[in-house]
Image: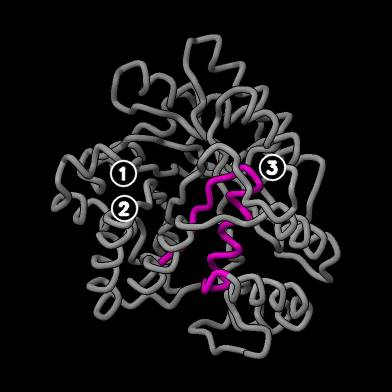
């Protein structure tokens, strides 16, 4: 990073990945296969062609009858993706540590089902959340099971999600004893998550051990994309209530995003994504249509200055509200 406040921040180049939680989720995102699937297919290929290099999904993405729908869609799209392009991206799924998935072989059936839906493209498999707060023994056994799959050559990489710094170090060392590396950890990170000591510790642990730091919900379920003078309609009751509670308390922050964006002819979303990148994490932006994909791709073309990053940090710290935190995140 350069000393001059007006200089562009120059840290190790960090890309952008995209998340697919909405692909199959009716409850939060109002998914409709008859209208959404054709858009999602174009969105997927546009994102890959534009340089978004990590596709994040999960076996539990998809509600009700659409359980696993995100993986199914991605698997079908990957069948049409040239191998040359496939080799340049990471397909990362997450397996949920449901209470009935116990023991070292607890993920075996789930792995087979996800592998089937993704048509064999199981590059990185991540533990979806930590069970430390209610069944600490479960996640260690499941992680050892992922280690077994790795040693058998069935998966290439292992990742964690919603794992705090203490548990991250513990699990990292456990796998290291077997000669297996943890490749990534996912945490909720945006301008609407409160800065904490734990956040800094995770960032430092990742840097010291060459672990990829991934940020989910970098746009705070879309709140950070809303212009300061607008109150958009949402498809679902849950997002409507969230927007009603949070939008009025984030006007100053969103105004700053808007003003910085004007300087670069960029959207608020791009500014929010580049704040995450300037903070040392790769954002996993949720996209549902080609316009959103194009916007995320455009963020790769520019960076915040040191001064802009500092102003956003201050507004983040002083913001009157924040996003709800994942209750399963471990210490």
According to the picture, the residue beneath numbered tag 3 turns out to be: 2
How far, Cα to Cα, is label 1 from label 3? 44 Å
From the top left corner, tell me how far across and down residue 188 is, in percent: 63, 52
First in sequence: mark 1 vs mark 3? 3
Q: Secondary structure at mark 2?
A: helix
Q: Is residue 281 magenta?
A: yes
> Where does label 1 land, which residue?
114
Using a 10 Å C-alpha cutoff, classify the residue at mark 1 as few (fewer than 14 neighbours), some (14 to 19) or many (20 or more).
many
Task: State the image coordinates of residue 71 (x, y, percent, origin top left).
Answer: 31, 53
Which residue is located at x 82 percent, y 41 percent?
Answer: 197
Of badges 1 and 3, nearer the viewer stands: 3
Name the colour scheme: one colour
Q: Nearer the N terminus, badge 2 or badge 3?
A: 3
The quarter of the picture where the N terminus appears is: top right
Contact between labelled residues 3 and 2, with CB atoms less than 8 Å apart: no
Magenta span of residues: 264-287
Label 1 or label 2, whichever comes before in sequence order: 2
Near mark 3 (Cα within 10 A), the count class, few <14, some 14-19 or many ≥20, is few
In the picture, measured across the screen, residue 102 lies left or right of residue 148, that is: right
Give 310 or 135, whichever is nearer the viewer: 310
Viewer can see residue 28: yes
Q: Is residue 174 magenta?
A: no
Q: Which residue is pictured at 64% across the width and 23% down the height?
A: 208
Q: Return the residue nearer the eye: 241 or 136.
A: 241
- The residue depicted at 66 percent of the width and 31 percent of the height is 136
Query: What element does badge 3 sit on?
Result: loop
Q: Is residue 266 left or right of residue 105?
A: right
Mark 1 vs 2: CB contact within 8 A? yes
**Image coordinates for residue 282, horizontal then vertical, percent:** 53, 46
The Cα atoms of the two marked residues, 2 and 3, are separated by 41 Å
Residue wearing tag 2: 71
């Amino acid at each position: 990073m350069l000393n001059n406040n007006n200089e562009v921040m120059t840290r190790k180049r960090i890309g952008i990945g995209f998340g697919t939680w909405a692909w199959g989720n009716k409850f939060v995102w109002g998914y409709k296969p008859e209208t959404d699937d054709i858009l999602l297919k174009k969105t997927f290929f546009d994102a890959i062609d534009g340089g978004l290099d990590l596709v994040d999904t999960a076996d539990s993405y998809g509600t009700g009858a659409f359980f696993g729908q995100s993986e199914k869609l991605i698997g079908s799209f990957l069948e049409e993706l040239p191998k040359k392009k496939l080799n340049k991206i990471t397909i990362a799924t997450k397996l949920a540590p449901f209470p009935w998935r116990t023991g070292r072989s607890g993920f075996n059936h789930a792995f087979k089902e996800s592998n089937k839906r993704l048509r064999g493209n199981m590059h990185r498999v991540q533990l979806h959340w930590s069970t430390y707060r209610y069944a600490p023994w479960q996640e260690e056994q499941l992680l050892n099971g992922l280690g077994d799959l790795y040693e058998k050559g069935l998966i290439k990489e292992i990742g964690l999600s919603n794992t705090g710094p203490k548990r991250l170090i513990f699990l990292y060392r456990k796998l290291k004893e077997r000669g297996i590396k943890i490749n990534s950890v996912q945490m909720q990170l945006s301008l609407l998550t409160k800065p904490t000591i734990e956040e800094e510790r995770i960032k430092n642990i990742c840097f010291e051990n060459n672990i990829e730091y991934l940020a989910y919900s970098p746009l705070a379920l879309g709140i950070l994309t809303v212009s300061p003078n607008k109150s958009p309609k949402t498809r679902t009751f849950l997002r409507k209530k969230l927007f009603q509670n949070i939008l009025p308390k984030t006007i100053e922050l969103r105004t700053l995003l808007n003003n910085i964006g004007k300087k670069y002819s960029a959207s608020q979303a791009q500014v929010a994504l580049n704040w995450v990148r300037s903070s040392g994490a790769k954002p996993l932006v949720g996209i549902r249509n080609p316009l959103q994909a194009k916007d995320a791709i455009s963020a790769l073309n520019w960076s915040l200055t040191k001064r802009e990053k500092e102003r956003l940090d201050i507004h983040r710290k002083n913001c009157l509200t924040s996003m709800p935190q994942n209750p399963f995140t471990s210490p």
